[in-house]
Amino acid sequence: MDEPTPKELFLQSVSRCVGIEAFIPSFYDRFLASSEEIRAKFRFTDFEKQNKMLARSLELCACATAGEAESLAEINERATTHNRDHMNIEPRLYDTWLDSIVETASEFDDEWTDAIEAAWRRILGHVVQRMVRKY
Ligand code: HEM
């Protein structure tokens, strides 16, 4: 059998993580704990909605990285809502976002390996680059 692709490794890992109810709240705890600036961005956020949104976003990232046109179009829309004229998410905040989510996933995925970590960083890194380019 062929080796799993990064997309497959990533999606299987995402599905193990989001299968645990505490995963996404735990990511937001970690992410919000990292700075006052990040806490301020989320001061009006309804986290029940945000938790569902993030699970969906992770799958969207995998499809966008695989080049699927609809997903790429949606990432471009998210890049607009996050840019300097809208939520003003500065590029350096994406590094914290990426580290927070990878660290959280490594704690929740009981099959975690270096190859899985590389797949998370590659797929999300690709989307982060696209969002940052449009800042
Ligand atoms: C690749 C990384 C990211 C993805 C895919 C992503 C995706 C999303 C999506 C789908 C939404 C909801 C729809 C929208 O308002 O556009 C959202 C909202 C939001 N995102 Fe991001 N995001 C990312 C990174 C970040 C980062 C680094 C921050 C930094 C603080 C951030 C802050 C926010 C805030 C404040 C909201 C609005 C929450 C609310 O409704 O109150 N995002 N994001």
Image: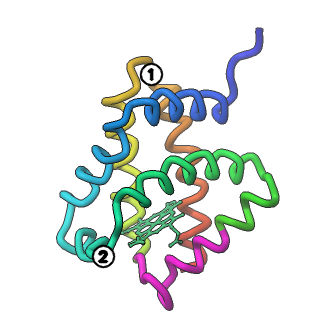
**Residue sitting at 64 percent across and 65 percent down?**
75
Q: Residue 49 location, x and y as percent? A: 43, 60
| Stretch in magenta | 76-89
x and y, in percent, of residue 19 in the image: 45, 30
* Image color mode: rainbow
Quarter-of-image position of residue 47 = bottom left
Give the residue furthest to the right. Answer: 69
Q: Is residue 87 above or below residue 78?
A: below
- Residues 75 and 25: in front is 25
The amino acid beneath tag 1 is Thr
Nearest to the eye among marks 2 and 1: give it.
Answer: 2
In the rendered image, residue 87 lying in the magenta stretch gets the answer yes
Q: Residue at x 26, y 74 (%)?
A: 43
Q: Which residue occupies the foreground of this view, 15 or 33?
A: 15
Residue at image point 24% right, 50% down: 30
User: In the rendering, at what x and y percent does residue 53 appear?
Assistant: 50, 56
Disc sitting over residue 44 in the figure: 2
In the current view of this chain or complex, which residue is farthest to the top? Answer: 1
Task: Measure the C-alpha gap from mark 2 to mark 1.
Answer: 36 Å
Mark sitting earlier along the chain (2/1): 2
Let me know if residue 130 is in the magenta part: no
| Along the line of sight, the residue nearer the viewer: 130 or 18 | 18
